[in-house]
Each structure stands twice: as C-alpha cells, then as structure tokens.
Image (cartoon, helix red, strand yellow):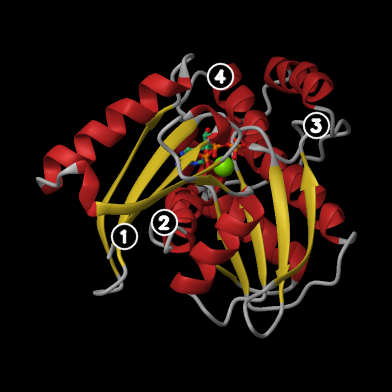
Amino acid sequence: MITLGIDVGSRNTKLIIFDHTKQSILFQEWIATNIDPTKSIEQLYTKALTALKLPEQSIAAKVATGYGRKIWPLADKVISEISAHAAGIVWLKPEARTIIDIGGQDSKVIALDSQGKVFDFAMNDKCAAGTGRFLEMTAMRLGIEVSQLSDLAADADREIKLNNTCVVFAETEIISLMASKVSATNIVRAVHRSIAKRIFSQMSALTHQAPYAFTGGVAQNQDLANCISMELGSELWIPPEPEITAALGAAILAKP
Ligand SMILES: Nc1ncnc2c1ncn2[C@@H]1O[C@H](COP(=O)(O)OP(=O)(O)OP(=O)(O)O)[C@@H](O)[C@H]1O
Ligand SMILES: [Mg+2]
C-alpha cells in the first residue's frame, strides 16, 4: 500500500510517498512554499506521480500537515504537526523520547512515552526568538547564506552574549556588534547560544528525557545542535534529512 504525506510549512513544502508494504520511502522532495501554497503542493504532487510513474488512484490516502495543511482539496485528512513529527521520528528512531523541531516560523518540543505516543508538547509560535527566522535575519545582516552559519560559528574564539532575545532588538544589537568589529564568527555563535537557551527554557514547560531528536530545516545547523546539546547536557540525534520528518509522519499516519 502506498500513501502520501505533505507538510506545508511556513518556509518549505515537503512531500513524501511511502510504501507501507516495503516500509520504505519511494519519493521525497521539498521546495520553498509559494506565496500561493497550493502551487507548491501541486508542483510536488505532479513531480512525484511523474517520477514514480504512478496513477493517482494507486495512492491509498493523502494526509496534509503544517501551517497550510487545510488548503489542499485532494487531502483525505489533515493532522497536527505534533502528531506528524512524532510519527516520523518514531519510524526513524523508535527509542527517541523527546523531539525538538525548529522550522522557519515556530519551534516545538514534543515528549514521547515508551510506546512512542505523544504525552506532552510545548510550542512557540508567537515569537521568532527560538526559530529559523532568527537565523535568517542573522545571515541576511552578515550577507551570507543560512547554510553557511554552522561552519562559520564553528571557528568562534570569543564568548559574546546577546542581551536581547527578541529578534527585532537582537538585529539592532548585531548591527552594533558588527560596527564594533566583532567577527561574524563570534556573532553567529552568540546567536546560536541565544537560540539554544531559548529552546532550553521552552523545554522547562514539560518533562523531557533522552534520547533527544532534533528535526526541522534548522537541524541542519550542526553548531546550533551542539549549543542545544550543551544546554541539555545530552546528545541530539539528527535524522539525515531533518526537514522531511513531518511529511514522513503524515505519510505513515495516512495508512487507512
Ligand atoms: N543548512 C541550514 N542551516 C540552518 N538553517 C537552515 C538550513 N537550511 C534551512 N534552514 C532553515 O530552516 C528553516 C526552514 O525549515 P523547515 O522547512 O523545517 O520550516 P517550515 O516547516 O517551513 O517552517 P514551520 O514549521 O515553522 O512552519 C528556515 O528558517 C531556514 O532558514
Ligand atoms: Mg515545519
């Protein structure tokens, strides 16, 4: 049986086609979420069907998640990102007990029991401080790509503390640090430390335990992962492609 999962995120839309008989991913792809998210969904859907040479009716069920989950008329069901991330991680790493997901717009911490069921979660969707938006602003100010932040911060040689957690005020602080000739390397590390502290304090709202998994596009930032690890005093497991976890979970939960 073949199912489809789609995660319409604030930044990226990800699509997974999952074969339940073989327990394997047949297709995975992501693109930036268009200003009209239906266009991104249709583009990925057509691409998947073409690549796999599948007729539409061979997909037993389609499940959507993410902030734009309600806009695709072809979806059989919509589910929360919490359920989707949990199902994705349980399939990838069954022993995980806590999931940290950082996307472009929000961050979530999800606590799982020994059966892989969600028993608590904390979500931050009102403030950019612990999210990819902070990284995007930092990269933009430094004139680099978000994907370059991790390698840059890895060479940090001086501890700089950002006084402002609010991204709007932190931006002004970064501009003034740049004017004071503080290196980009040390500024980026300070941003990572600030995000890590923010996530750690978000986690205090719930009971959490190792093993920890880190998902979402931001989990590609290894230096930030190291900073969160330091706060937790525990290692973080990162899937090989952390951005697709929720789409994978949606495809898994799509099984009729
Ligand atoms: N290599 C990278 N290093 C750090 N951050 C990255 C990297 N690649 C992408 N990102 C960040 O990941 C974020 C997008 O991740 P993701 O696709 O999980 O978000 P989303 O699901 O669209 O957002 P949300 O879940 O908040 O709606 C962006 O903020 C982007 O800047
Ligand atoms: Mg997301």
Residue beneath label 4, please? 140
Look at the image and tell me whether residue 216 can be seen. yes
In the image, what residue occupies the spot 60% across and 76% down?
96
Three-letter residue code for mark 1 = Phe
Circle nearer the N terminus (1, 4)? 1
In the image, what residue occupies the spot 31% across and 60% down?
18
Three-letter residue code for mark 4 = Met
Circle nearer the N terminus (2, 3)? 3
Give the Cα separation between the discs numbered 4 and 2: 34 Å
- Residue 25 appears left or right of 53: right
Residue beneath label 1, please? 18
Circle nearer the N terminus (4, 2)? 4
- Residue 171 appears left or right of 38: right
Callout 1: SS: strand
In the image, what residue occupies the spot 49% across and 62% down?
253
**The C terminus is located in which quarter?**
bottom left
**The N terminus is located in which quarter?**
bottom left
Whether residues under marks 2 and 1 lie with C-beta atoms below 8 angstroms apart, the answer is yes
- Residue 127 appears left or right of 105: right
Give the Cα separation between the discs numbered 1 and 4: 36 Å
249 relative to 55, above or below:
below
Residue beneath label 2, please? 251
